[in-house]
Amino acid sequence: MSNELSLFFTLFARLGGFFLLSPLFSKRNIPIWVRFGLALCCSLLLLPPLSMQMTITVENPIFFTTQIIQEVAVGYLLGFLFSLLFEAAAFAGQLVGTMTGFSATELLDPSSNSSQPLISRLFVLTLFALFLALDLHHALLRLLYESYTTIPPNLTLGIVEASGRLFTHALSYALFPVTVLFIVILCFAILARFFPALQIFWTGFPIQLLIGMGAIAFAIGFFGQILQGAFNEFWSLAKNLFFPLR
């Protein structure tokens, strides 16, 4: 097998794991042919520059098969880390939605065939729009290119640290709305204590809803900065998964 063909299969294995199997891209609303096409196009784009930098020799078919499986696993783990950026927004939206009063309002997500809170859906769609508007998709493609020439310091540490960062970013997205709504609920609790016949939690629900939506609108203005910081951390953590092609 020629060097170009061996390199292409190795490239496609890692990118296939990223686009075909990772949680973010494996949803049913993204057709399989779109994911396959993305993996194929990116492999063909990376093949010319990488073929001049490295040589892959196939002396043992069993070793080459093991390397292909290894590349698929690395691509999947890269996609898993990338999906955590948006899972953090979904978790933050669920937290804010509960305090706003939308806990009983859920949307059916056709991609996963499960229900998703309304505010979570809003946060995730907003983050997708910001991801494209900030040109972070170009940085992601650059990251995939660099993943073939960088050696990782520690694989396990990157996975554990990335999972922990999920909750940090979730609190960053929800910090302002949750703080404002906590103050509103605390005021309602004090009023209910002094005026028990007022039924403040029922009569004040429209106020809580309006204040919550205003706080969400204000907080969305800072989502771009939070997303950029989260992507920079994803960049550094993802390098724990990288190792050069051999």
Image: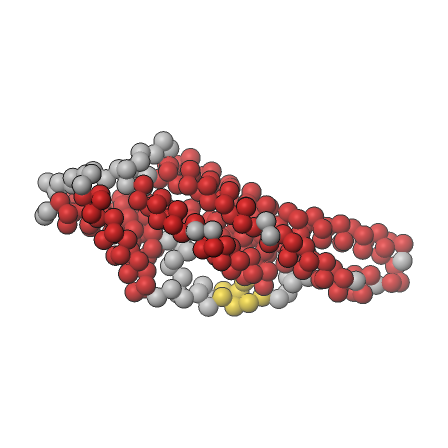
- The residue depicted at 59 percent of the width and 56 percent of the height is 94
State the count of labels: 0
- The residue depicted at 60 percent of the width and 46 percent of the height is 171
The relative height of residue 93 versus residue 6 in the rendered view (above or below) is below
Quadrant location, the C terminus: top left
List x then y, in percent, for residue 40.
25, 57
- Tell me: 66 left or right of 81: left
The relative height of residue 51 versus residue 200 in the rendered view (above or below) is above
- Tell me: 6 left or right of 107: left
| Color style of the picture | secondary structure
- In this orientation, does residue 144 appear? yes
Q: Closer to the camera, 216 or 70?
A: 216
- In this orientation, does residue 83 appear? no
Quarter where residue 160 is shown = top left
Quarter where residue 60 is shown = top left
Q: Closer to the camera, 53 or 16?
A: 53
| Residue at the outermost top position | 153
- The residue depicted at 60 percent of the width and 54 percent of the height is 220
- The residue depicted at 83 percent of the width and 63 percent of the height is 199
List x then y, in percent, for residue 117.
58, 62
List x then y, in percent, for residue 129.
49, 58
List x then y, in percent, for residue 174.
62, 50
Q: Closer to the camera, 94 or 38?
A: 38
- Tell me: 102 left or right of 238: right
